[in-house]
Image (cartoon, rainbow, N blue to C red):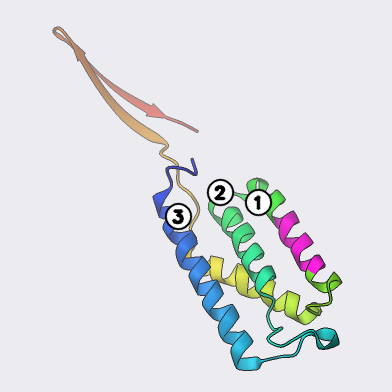
């Protein structure tokens, strides 16, 4: 399913680059200092926006049950950024919003082929078939 999904790959690519552009644009424009003087450009969290963008893409494209591990990883990433004192809650929240928002702009649900028309012939026999999967 995923390996043959060229449309989904293109949607992920557009969403990813939009997410990165917005995230780093906000970082440079706002130049918010990190907690405990650990540097600049804290808002929004880039790690968080990237992981939530990926998890949200899987959710939007393939369904929630496939995205559960990715959301768990995104949540762990967000927690680790606060725990490492690189971001505060606002940085993390903004990163998640930017990541999920970028996915909502570009991603459509995956549509499997539910109907198939078949044709086969041998000698003087012809067979036309119609298959519908629920």
Mark 2 vs mark 3, CA separation in Å: 12 Å
Q: Is residue 27 left or right of residue 112?
A: right
Residue at label 3?
A: 9
According to the picture, the residue beneath numbered tag 1 turns out to be: 67
Report helix, strand or loop for mark 1.
helix
Query: Which residue occupies the extreme left position in the image?
Result: 124
Q: Residue at x 46, y 63 (%)?
A: 13
The quadrant in which residue 130 appears is: top left
At x 50%, y 33%, the residue is 134
State whether residue 94 is above or below residue 112: below
Q: Earlier in the sequence, mark 2 or mark 1?
A: 2
**Left or right: residue 39 compared with residue 62:** right
Circle 3: element type: helix
Give the class, few, some or many, for how many residues have Cα within 10 Å of label 3's Cα (few <14, many ≥20). some
User: In the current view of this chain or complex, which residue is farthest to the front?
Assistant: 38
Callout in the foreground (1, 3): 3
Residue 89 is one of the magenta-drawn residues: no
**Image point (83%, 72%), residue name:** 84
In terms of image quadrants, where is residue 30?
bottom right
Element under label 2? helix
Which mark is first along the chain, 3 or 2? 3
In the rendered structure, find residue 43 and report the number of the disc placed on it.
none
Label 1 vs label 3: CA separation? Answer: 16 Å
Percent x, y for residue 88? 81, 80
Tell me the magenta residue range: 71-80
Q: Which residue is mark 2?
A: 62
């Amino acid at each position: 399913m995923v390996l043959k999904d060229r449309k989904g790959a293109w949607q992920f690519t557009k969403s990813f680059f939009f997410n990165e552009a917005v995230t780093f644009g906000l970082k440079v424009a706002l130049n918010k200092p990190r907690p405990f003087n650990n540097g600049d450009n804290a808002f929004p969290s880039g790690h968080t926006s990237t992981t939530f963008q990926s998890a949200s893409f899987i959710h939007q494209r393939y369904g929630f049950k496939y995205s559960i591990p990715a959301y768990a990883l995104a949540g762990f990433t967000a927690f680790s950024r606060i725990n490492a004192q690189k971001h505060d809650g606002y940085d993390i929240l903004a990163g998640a919003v930017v990541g999920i928002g970028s996915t909502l702009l570009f991603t459509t649900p995956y549509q499997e082929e539910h109907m198939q028309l078949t044709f086969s012939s041998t000698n003087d026999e012809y067979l036309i078939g119609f298959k519908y999967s629920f």
